[in-house]
Image (cartoon, helix red, strand yellow):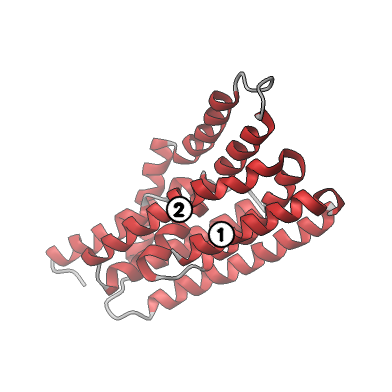
């Protein structure tokens, strides 16, 4: 839950600063921060992958096969597309007809910020990582991004942006708590394989989302996180190390 608490704090800080100073922040400052975060995310992803290789019993082929199978399943289920469509459809559904209602600006700010902060592969991967291992690095990176996003949103949509932390707490915190419970069924090798997969997903997020070097549908690789421990169990049943 540490990463979620940090995320809530940065949204509150960014949103408050947005209410006060938002219009004065130049775009080039935001761009430089995002590039720095992208480079840092690359480094963290590489580190996660390399560190997982040092665990005794870890098999380098497991994350590879997991990513291949997970990617095929993700493309079949169109996870990345569905995540984006979910955010768009929820915004349309819940903001329809409120433009003339009292407090509509508050509601739009609340909904827009909640969807932005909670819909996406970085949220899911970071929450799982935080719950399983207590490693909140990815959520810390996301927190900085959300802080700047909250600054920008609050400067135009107002106080409702700050109340999105209630959704962040429920959604991200819920995923982390579920992952923490799953830890009872996962051993060190399984977690190491999931970390290796997570490192590769993190590289995809950095290259495709933060640095925008090329489009990478990292969300479609999310099933690999579930396939990795299952594959470890299967190999053990077959007596393959």
x and y, in percent, of residue 228 in the image: 31, 59
- Point out the image quarter for the N terminus: bottom left
* CB contact under 8 Å: marks 2 and 1: yes
Q: Is residue 231 above or below residue 59?
A: above
Q: Which mark is residue 172?
A: 2
Residue occupying the far front of the picture: 102
Task: From the top left corner, tell me how far across and down residue 79 is, in percent.
Answer: 44, 40
Instruction: Residue under label 1, please give it.
Output: 7
Task: Name the spot of residue 111 as percent of width and height, x first.
Answer: 58, 36
Residue 85 visible in the picture: yes
Snapshot quadrant of residue 34? bottom right
Q: Secondary structure at mark 1?
A: helix
- Element marked by disc 2: helix
Taking 11 as reference, is 233 left or right? Answer: left
Residue 153 is left or right of residue 236, and the answer is right
Binning the other alpha carbons within 10 Å of mark 1 as few (below 14), some (14 to 19) or many (20 upward) gives many
Q: Nearer the viewer, residue 157 or 61?
A: 157
Q: Residue at x 51, y 74 (%)?
A: 47
Q: Position of residue 43 (x, y in %)?
A: 58, 71
């Amino acid at each position: 839950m540490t990463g979620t608490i940090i995320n809530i704090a940065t949204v509150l800080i960014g949103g408050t600063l947005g209410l006060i100073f938002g219009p004065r922040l130049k775009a080039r400052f935001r761009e430089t921060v995002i590039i720095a975060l992208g480079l840092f995310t690359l480094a963290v992803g590489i580190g996660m992958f390399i560190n997982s290789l040092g665990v005794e019993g870890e098999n380098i082929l497991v994350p590879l096969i997991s990513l291949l199978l997970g990617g095929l399943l993700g493309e079949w289920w169109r996870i990345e597309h569905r995540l984006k469509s979910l955010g768009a459809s929820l915004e349309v559904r819940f903001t329809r007809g409120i433009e003339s209602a009292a407090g509509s600006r508050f509601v739009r700010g609340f909904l827009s910020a909640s969807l932005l902060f909670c819909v996406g592969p970085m949220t899911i991967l970071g929450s799982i990582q935080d719950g399983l291992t207590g490693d909140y690095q990815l959520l810390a990176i996301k927190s900085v991004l959300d802080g700047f996003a909250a600054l920008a949103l609050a400067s135009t949509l107002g106080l409702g942006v700050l109340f999105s932390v209630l959704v962040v707490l429920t959604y991200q915190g819920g995923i982390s708590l579920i992952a923490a419970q799953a830890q009872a069924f996962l051993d060190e090798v399984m977690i190491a394989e999931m970390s290796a997969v997570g490192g590769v997903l993190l590289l995809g997020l950095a290259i495709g989302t933060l640095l925008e070097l090329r489009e990478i549908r990292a969300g479609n690789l999310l099933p690999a996180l579930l396939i990795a421990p299952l594959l470890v169990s299967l190999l053990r049943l077959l007596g393959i190390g």
